Structures are given as C-alpha cells and as structure tokens.
Image (cartoon, helix red, strand yellow):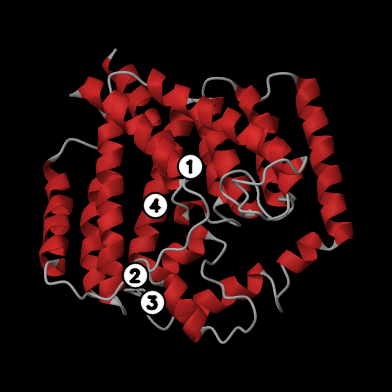
C-alpha cells in the first residue's frame, strides 16, 4: 500500500498544480444525496481520531466539522468541509509513503515546466496556454501574478529541502510577475539559509534596494493604504469578525459574506489577502486561536530540533500567508501539506533511529 501511495500521491499533486485559472461556484443543494454525502465525510473526519497521525490533523478534522453547524451559511461550510477532510487524508497518505523520490521528481518537473511556460509568455510566443491574452496578462499556468508568485515560492520551499538554490526561482518569477512580496519572502529565505556570508550580505542589499524601489513607485503605500489597500480589508474583516467572535462566519464563507457585508465598493475582495485574518473571520477567535497555537507548536519543535531548512521554509510560508492567500489556492494547498508531512516523516524517522 505504501508503494502505491508513493506513485499515486505525486500524480495528485501534479494534477492540482496544473489547474489553470478557474472560478469555483457552490451549487444549490438540489440533489437528495447531499445530506448522506456530508454524513459520510463527517464520519470520515471523526474516524481520523483513531488513526495514528499528527494531533493537529485530528483537531482540524473534528473541530471544523463542529464549526460548520454554527456557520452563518451551513451549506457552504459543509461543502468546504469535504475538501478539509480530503486534505487531512492526503496528509496521512503522504506520511505513509515509503519513498519521496517520485514526489520530488514531480516537483522538479513542475518548476521546469513553469519556467519554460513563463519564458514563452515573456517573449510573446505562447498563444495557447495564456488563453489569447498578452504576455503581461497571464503568468505560468496559474495566470494571476500574486498566485503565480505564491505557487513558485512554496514549490521552491519544498525543493529547497534538497538544495537551497531552488529559492532563486521565485525571485525570477517575482520579477517577471511584478510580485514584490514574492521577491521579499524569497530573499528572506536566502538570507537565513545561505551558508556564505557574502551571499547573505548581497541578499540583504538587494532586498533593501527592492524595498526602496517599491516605496518610491508607490507599490507599498498603495498596498497598505487604509482607503483602498490590504489594511482597509483586514480592519473591516476584523470588524465583521467581532460581530461573531466565538464561532466566526463559518468555514469557506469569506468570499460570499465579506463582499456582501463589507460595504467596500470597487474591487470584490473574495479573499482577505491574509490567510491568518481569513481563518479568524471564518472560524472565530477560539478555533483560529487553536490553529495558531498548533502552528506555533510546530515552529517550537523545529527550533528545538535545529532543522534550519525546514524552519526557514516554515517561516517563509507563514510570511507569504500574511499578504497573499496560498491557503486558498488549489495549487498551493497540497504543497503546504506536502511540506509539513515531509517534515513529520523526517522527524519521525530521526526519532525512531
């Protein structure tokens, strides 16, 4: 079974990572089997309590199911819960693979594939996968510049476990896609991972220069503007959270609830551009607090084990989640789970040796 998982799970990662820009819509519950479907996934979520796995996964599988009952839009939340259970079992499957080599082959292939595609788009030779748009309108297979930036960053973080040099890829992608936060996160990773002090110094200087350019161009002030930027969205999200502080609005409800109640005109903010704020909005202070506590426990464990590559990768992913929304991207979620599962597998192997 473990050998089968080693072949099947990398294919799942590849398929999800190759999904082009699409929009998901939750259909009304018109079919009679929907309650049975939710009951099955609720049962599968509870069953995880009796599977030997990370306690964090057990807590997520059960507590988010309970949270759906208190949602402001239960149908949407229970549909979201199906994907949450699938992610939990995906994590469990990853930790039971007997070989990670096929997975890293897939990750390297995804990086090379997107590199070729980006080059073709930049020189204007891609008239198929960019859906007929100009090369400045779509990036890689993902399409949107922030999403492509997050994807390239987290993909490279997973590969940096093999070699830190892979962190150059998101810097190149960030420049092509004009994603300043991607460049910032990648350079932070290089500063802490690089063994050469000259590379560290050069990275810091380039990082400072990039920040100055972003400030002078107005990119940072615009993004942090209280009138039209992310800070405005974060503040309004917290205001709405405080209307339902304990239970939140419900898993998966942000893109439906926030645009309707925020009163913000213009851009339809379907994500908070901050996964931590969005978790709090949907889950409430109690569950989101437990999630952050679990995240900090993982961080503490990495620090105590002095595993520098995993620690830096974990911090860079957490940093990206503060401005972008990788936890809401179908291409990035499997990679984040993969990173955590691989860390668990390595930590377990060391503990048993």
* Residue under the image location 58 percent in, 56 percent down: 324
Q: Earlier in the sequence, mark 3 or mark 2?
A: 2
Question: Disc 2 to disc 1, how far (Cα)?
Answer: 22 Å
Question: Would you call the spot at circle 2 few (<14 residues within 10 Å), some (14-19), or many (20 or more)?
Answer: few
On the question of residue 315 being in view, the answer is yes
On the question of residue 60 being in view, the answer is no
Of the residues tagged 3 and 2, which is closer to the observer?
Answer: 2
Q: In this view, does 62 lie to the left or right of 312?
A: left
* Residue under the image location 42 percent in, 47 percent down: 295
- Label 3: which secondary element: loop
Q: Which of marks 3 and 1 is nearer the N terminus?
A: 1
Q: Are marks 3 and 4 in contact (CB under 8 Å)?
A: no
Disc 1: which residue:
18
Query: In the rendered view, would you say 215 is above or below 124?
Result: below
Q: Residue at the right extreme?
A: 216
Q: Earlier in the sequence, mark 4 or mark 2?
A: 2
Query: In the rendered view, would you say 69 is above or below 21?
Result: below
Q: Do the residues labelled 4 and 2 touch (CB within 8 Å)?
A: no
Disc 4: which residue:
293
Indicate the quadrant where residue 323 lies.
Answer: bottom right
Question: Disc 1 to disc 4, how far (Cα)?
Answer: 33 Å
């Amino acid at each position: 079974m473990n050998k089968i998982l080693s072949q099947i799970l990398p294919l799942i990662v590849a398929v999800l990572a190759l999904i082009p820009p699409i929009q998901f819509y939750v259909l009304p519950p018109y079919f009679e089997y929907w309650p049975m479907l939710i009951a099955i996934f609720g049962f599968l979520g509870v069953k995880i309590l009796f599977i030997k796995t990370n306690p964090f996964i057990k807590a997520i599988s059960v507590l988010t199911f309970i949270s759906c009952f208190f949602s402001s839009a239960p149908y949407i939340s229970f549909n979201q819960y199906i994907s949450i259970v699938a992610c939990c079992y995906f994590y469990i499957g990853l930790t039971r693979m007997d070989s990670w080599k096929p997975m890293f082959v897939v990750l390297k292939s995804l990086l090379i594939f997107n590199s070729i595609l980006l080059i073709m788009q930049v020189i204007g030779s891609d008239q198929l996968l960019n859906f007929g748009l100009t090369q400045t309108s779509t990036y890689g297979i993902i399409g949107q510049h922030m999403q492509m930036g997050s994807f390239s960053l987290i993909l490279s973080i997973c590969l940096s476990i093999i070699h830190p040099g892979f962190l150059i890829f998101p810097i190149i992608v960030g420049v092509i896609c004009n994603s300043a936060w991607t460049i910032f996160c990648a350079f932070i990773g290089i500063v802490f991972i690089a063994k050469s002090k000259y590379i560290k110094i050069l990275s810091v200087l380039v990082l400072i220069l990039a920040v100055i350019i972003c400030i002078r161009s107005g990119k940072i002030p615009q993004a942090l503007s209280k009138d039209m930027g992310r800070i405005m969205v974060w503040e309004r999200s917290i205001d709405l959270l405080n209307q339902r502080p304990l239970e939140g609005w419900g898993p998966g409800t942000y893109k439906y609830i926030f645009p309707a109640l925020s009163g913000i005109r213009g851009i339809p903010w379907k994500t908070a551009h901050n996964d931590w704020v969005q978790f709090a909005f949907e889950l409430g202070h109690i569950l989101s607090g437990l999630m952050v506590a679990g995240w900090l426990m993982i961080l503490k464990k990495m620090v105590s084990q002095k595993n520098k590559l995993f620690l830096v990768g974990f911090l860079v992913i957490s940093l990206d989640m503060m401005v972008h929304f990788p936890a809401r991207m179908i291409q990035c979620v499997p990679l984040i789970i993969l990173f955590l599962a691989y860390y668990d597998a390595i930590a377990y192997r060391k503990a048993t040796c």
